[in-house]
Amino acid sequence: MKLLLSLLASLALVGTAYAGGEMKEVCKDKTDKAGKVVNDKAGKPVQVCKKIKVHKKVEGDKGSRTC
């Protein structure tokens, strides 16, 4: 029983370690097969939005590589 609880606790910690990224919503205009922008009834372009995770870029100096 203790082994099962410790396994669940470790899995929960791993799940929270990967959830640290910043979420950003990216939208772009929807196009048809001909490549034209699709408009709604009001005449505004229809947009397709997706949420993506943005990772921080790690800067380093060139001297730190060992390869």
Image: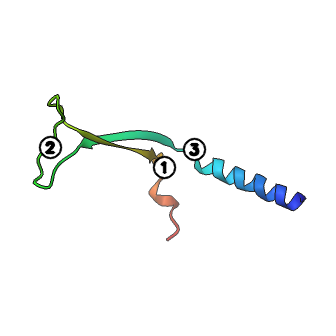
> Could you say where residue 54 lies in the image, as x and y percent from the top left?
44, 45
User: What is the x, y in percent for residue 28?
Assistant: 26, 42
Amino acid at pointer 3: Gly
Q: Earlier in the sequence, mark 1 or mark 3?
A: 3
Q: In the image, 35: left or right of 10?
A: left
Q: Which residue was labeled with disc 1?
A: 58
Residue at 75% x, 55% y: name it. Answer: 10
Of discs 1 and 3, which sits in the foreground? 3
Q: How far apart are the alpha carbons under marks 2 and 3?
A: 36 Å
The residue located at (83%, 55%) in the rendering is 5
Q: Quadrant of residue 33?
A: bottom left
Q: Mark 2 to mark 1: distance in Å?
A: 37 Å
Q: Is residue 15 left or right of residue 9?
A: left
Label annotation for residue 37: 2
Q: Which marked residue is nearer to the observer: mark 2 or mark 1?
A: 2
- Whichever of callouts 2 and 1 sits on the residue coming sooner in the sequence is 2
- Horizontally, is 66 left or right of 29 in the view? right
67 in relation to 40, above or below: below
Q: Nearer the viewer, mark 2 or mark 3?
A: 2
The residue that mark 3 highlights is 20
Type of amino acid at the residue the image marks with label 2: Val
- Identify which residue, 21 or 62, lies in the foreground: 21
Residue at image point 52% right, 44% down: 21
Rounded to the nearest angstrom, the CA distance separating label 1 from label 3 is 15 Å
Describe residue 23's horizontal placement relative to residue 42 as left or right.
Answer: right
Question: Where is residue 17 shown, x and y percent of the image?
Answer: 63, 49
